[in-house]
Amino acid sequence: MYDLVIRGATIVDGLGHEPKCADLAVKDGRIAAIDDIKDSGAETIDAGGLTLAPGIVDVHTHYDAQVTWDTTLSPSPSLGVTTAVIGNCGFGIVPAPPAVRDLVIRNLSVVEGMDLDALRQGIAWDFESFGDYIAMLRRRGAYANLAVLSGHSTIRTAVMGEAASQRAEATPEEIAKMKAMVADAMAHGAIGLGASYSLNHSGYGGVPMPSTIAPLSELDALVGAMGPRGKGVIAIASGVKTPAELEPMAAKYGRPFFQGTGMAMYNEQEPARALGIFDACAAAIRRGNGLYVQIPCQPLSFDFTMANAYPFYSHSAFDPIKAFTPEQLAAVYRDPSWRDKFRENAKNPRPGMIFQGNWDRVMVAVAQKPANARYVNRYLHEIAKAEGRDPLDVMLDLSLDEGLETAFLGRFLNVGDEGVARLLKHEAGVVALSDAGAHLIYMCDAGFGLHFLSHWVRERGDFDIVEGIRRLTSHPADLYGIRNRGRIALGAQADLLLFDPATVGVTPAERVADLPGGGRRTIRRPTGVHGVFCNGIRTFDGKDYATLAKGPGHVLDKFNDSLGRHSALAAQ
């Protein structure tokens, strides 16, 4: 008898083969048969009319902290994700020497838009080293498979403390300690190294996140500490670092670099810029050097208030005030000289910044007072033009009138389907950047895969369902060296998504108060999902999470080396 039999589904295998109607059987967490199956299963599901695909592989998440109090990894498994890579941008929570723990999470709360009180109340610090953290993940058991990146900023903080954000040059002794921590992480199963050089990545009180001020020579030393040539990946928020700057490191160590940067997102103001970065990466791939771009399939949108104005944090006017209380911020926002400083920032944005001074992309989403309801769903530039005012003054005056509780929606980058589609289809692109688990106050893009299937496959037809599913499953899994995932094949792990192609998608964002201490976050819910399975165990039935004593997700600690993979791609 099989553990699970799914009958009559249209199977799309994630490998690019044509769909076929068949039964699928699971035994001991693996796909045991794909055929007209006569034998019964301990659990049998009639899937007539539904599509069965591999579970979505999300290579850019931030569940490092949340997993310590919420093993469901809500909301990602409900949104079809069965494998997640955590530790992105180098902002994990390990190594965790007791003396720097609060510093690490203070910075994390700002740079990834997390509730600091929830982090302080929720994280159970029963780990210190990377090996301890991996052991903790195994004990707890998540509802999805997890691969963990070691983090440049976290390691730098563990070694240098507060100086990690103050001093660019580490001493030789500090570099040696950092290299030892990277080597230890790789020995305990890290998938690679996360790092950031993003202008948008600031920590508590406006300090730069540690890796962003480190010279490239330090990153080179840490990449070199990862072990034999070809072992592991580098996931980097590359900021304004160019492919030309990163390719020598990829070539030197035979490790692929996966870049996430606003520079490589479609921008109508500079439509050729992102494509130029993609093309430069494709040229590097043809030279045998793995250089890829993580590209979101949704607009880079943020819900925010002026009490937590994350999209503006890369502008210098905000450097000294990021950790201010609402009362302190109100005094600053009333100051004409501060307004002039931010106004000047907005007129002269640097490449790579989220907010480019485009007030026509900032909308009033929620007004608190009935008298201000006339502004809702209107863009700031429109209001300003109608009232003969400056858009910045409109935003600040409205916020001050409502105690900084006015909610705004900014759609800053990756807007414009034709331009975005070209990047999504590009050979150097990897569909990613959900940021799931982070920026909870502002947004939730954890449903990127379901959005991809609804918008880019069903509605627009830029991808057929075969290629669309491949791009969400085996494509990222293979590039990252994740074994036996992202595919429906005999012997593969039974990570599965059962859905209705006609209705699959995500709901609008909603706010819930379910973080430790009652903190609020933004979530989305699925539509058209009928079941999500991780290693053959149903984690979500389309409406609710399964109640399990322990999540069925595996902690992934063995990966395919990159040399063969990327050489093969270069030859294609």
Image (cartoon, rainbow, N blue to C red):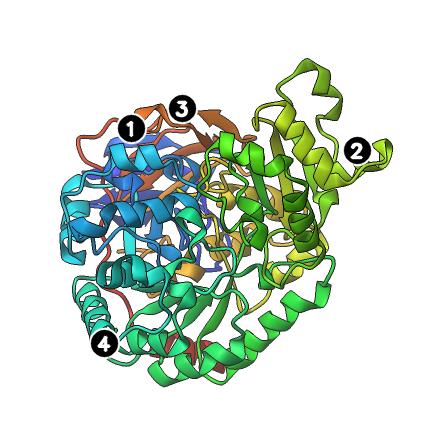
Task: Give the class, few, some or many, for how many residues have Cα within 10 Å of label 3's Cα (few <14, many ≥20).
Answer: few
Which residue is denoted by mark 4 in the rendering? 227
Label whose residue precedes the other's in the sequence (2 or 4): 4
Q: Quadrant of residue 131?
A: bottom left
Which residue is denoted by mark 2 in the rendering? 383
Disc 4 to disc 3, C-alpha distance: 43 Å
Disc 3 to disc 2, C-alpha distance: 32 Å
Which amino acid, mark 3? Ala
Which amino acid, mark 4? Gly
Q: Mark 1 and mark 2 in contact? Answer it, CB < 8 Å.
A: no
Left or right of residue 331: residue 83: left
In this view of the protein, which residue sits in the foreground, 394 or 49? 394
In this view of the protein, which residue sits in the foreground, 438 or 6? 438
Which residue is denoted by mark 3 in the rendering? 513
Instruction: Give the image location of residue 309, x and y in percent.
Output: 55, 41
Q: Mark 3 and mark 2 in contact? Answer it, CB < 8 Å.
A: no
Label whose residue precedes the other's in the sequence (4 or 3): 4
Disc 2 to disc 4, C-alpha distance: 57 Å
Label whose residue precedes the other's in the sequence (1 or 2): 2
Which residue is located at x 22 percent, y 63 percent?
159
